[in-house]
Image (cartoon, grey):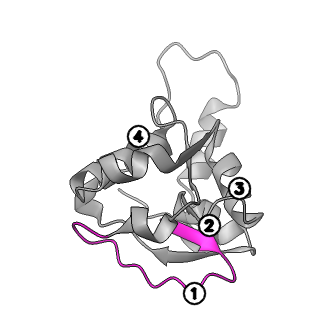
Amino acid sequence: MLIAPLDSTSTLRLVSGVDLAGAIGDGKLAVCTIESCPAGVYGKQSLEKLGIWASVQPKLAQGDNVRAALLLVSRGEAKFGIVYGTDAKAEPKVKVIDTFPAATHDPIVYPIALTKDSKNPDAATFEAYMRSMESVKILSGQGFTILK
């Protein structure tokens, strides 16, 4: 998601060639570390696919994680940010400007499985809970899509 502070009047649409760099101006685009943080990796993929990576790269403010990027935007220290939708939903001081098209980045998937050598006695209980209707309802309510 492309987010901005709650009082932003931006109406950007994330399409090929969008002038995000121009909209940022002298400000910053908050992201988590593009080399190692999954949201940063997906964000870079999207910016490259939209053909705007080179123009926004000098404007990046990289944080250690998505919550750090979210914080920069919520405080108005960055004009825009790239975060997961679930993170944007959790912060009342930001708003979603637009959603990156799914075709611009690898699928974002959080798999769950038991490892055959697990010695944790709670692992099977946790996996069963994550597959339960209660968990599906909670995760769906937070914006996750449950794959079967």
Identify the secondary structure beneath mark 1: loop
Residue 6 part of the magenta segment: yes
Identify the secondary structure beneath mark 3: helix
Calculate the distance from the C-alpha at mark 1 to the C-alpha at mark 2. Answer: 17 Å
N-term-proximal mark, 3 vs 2: 3
Image coordinates of residue 47 in percent, x first then y, are 32, 54
N-term-proximal mark, 1 vs 4: 1
Calculate the distance from the C-alpha at mark 3 to the C-alpha at mark 1. Answer: 18 Å
Q: Which residues are magenta?
A: 1-18
* Circle on res. 9: 1
In this rendered view, identify the residue nearer to me: 43 or 21. Answer: 21
Identify the secondary structure beneath mark 2: helix
> Which residue is at a point 46% across and 34% down the rendered structure image?
113
**Residue ID for mark 2:** 88
C-beta proximity under 8 Å, tags 3 and 2 = no
Image coordinates of residue 62 in percent, x first then y, are 58, 41
Image coordinates of residue 126 in percent, x first then y, are 64, 41
N-term-proximal mark, 2 vs 4: 4
Instruction: Tell me the amino acid under the disc marked 4.
Output: Val
Characterize the magenta stretch by its predominant secondary structure.
Answer: loop
Numbered disc in front, either 3 or 2: 3
Calculate the distance from the C-alpha at mark 1 to the C-alpha at mark 4. Answer: 27 Å
Residue 9 part of the magenta segment: yes
Q: Residues within 10 Å of mark 1 (few under 14, many from 20)?
A: few
Identify the secondary structure beneath mark 4: helix
Instruction: Judge whether 86 appears above or below 111 on screen.
Output: below
Calculate the distance from the C-alpha at mark 3 to the C-alpha at mark 2. Answer: 12 Å
Residue 101, quarter of picture: bottom left
Q: Residues within 10 Å of mark 4 (few under 14, many from 20)?
A: some
